[in-house]
């Protein structure tokens, strides 16, 4: 139970939210699926970087986060990210600070340096 405590708490929360939604007639925002329009980038798998653990479901990694630009609840960003309108390309990456050669790079030039790779890492937050 200790190793699966987050899954257990999430299940309890989902059951409670489902009960509340049924009683009030309202659906809770964190129970909705992520934006179906989001697409994966085409990338080749790098065999050197493959974790042996079962991967976290795509829905979980794309809907639960600690970035609060769109709200203070962990489910707010996935709910409100549709309002984000990034500037159209060309995007720039600025390397600056206490460095010898600060420089601004065009994102298209950086993407040409190497093909995209899919790497799976094992990450444990403590």
Image (cartoon, helix red, strand yellow):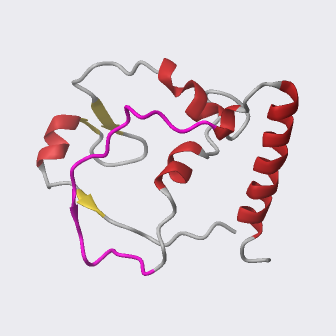
Q: Is residue 8 left or right of residue 124?
A: right
Residue 39 or residue 69, whichever sits in front:
39
66 vs 49: above or below: above
92 vs 83: above or below: below
Q: Is residue 104 left or right of residue 75?
A: left
Number of numbered discs overlaid on the protein picture:
0
79 vs 46: above or below: above
Look at 47% across and 53% down and name the residue there.
Answer: 58
- Image location of residue 100, percent across then percent down: 31, 48
Q: Which of the 4 image quarters holds residue 107?
A: top left
Look at 38% across and 68% down and name the residue there.
Answer: 120
- Image location of residue 25, percent across then percent down: 80, 25
Q: Which residues are magenta?
A: 32-52
- Image location of residue 49, percent across then percent down: 32, 74
Magenta-drawn stretch contains 44: yes
Residue 88 or residue 13, whichever sits in front:
13
């Amino acid at each position: 139970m200790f190793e699966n405590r987050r899954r257990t708490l999430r299940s309890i929360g989902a059951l409670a939210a489902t009960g509340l939604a049924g009683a009030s007639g309202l659906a809770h925002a964190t129970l909705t699926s992520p934006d179906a329009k989001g697409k994966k980038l085409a990338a080749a798998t790098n065999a050197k970087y493959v974790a042996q653990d079962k991967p976290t479901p795509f829905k979980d990694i794309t809907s639960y986060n600690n970035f609060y630009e769109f709200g203070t609840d962990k489910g707010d960003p996935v709910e409100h990210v549709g309002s984000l309108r990034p500037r159209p390309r060309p995007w720039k990456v600025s390397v600056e600070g206490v460095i010898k050669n600060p420089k601004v790079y065009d994102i298209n030039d950086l993407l040409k340096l190497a093909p995209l790779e899919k790497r799976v890492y094992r990450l444990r937050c403590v």
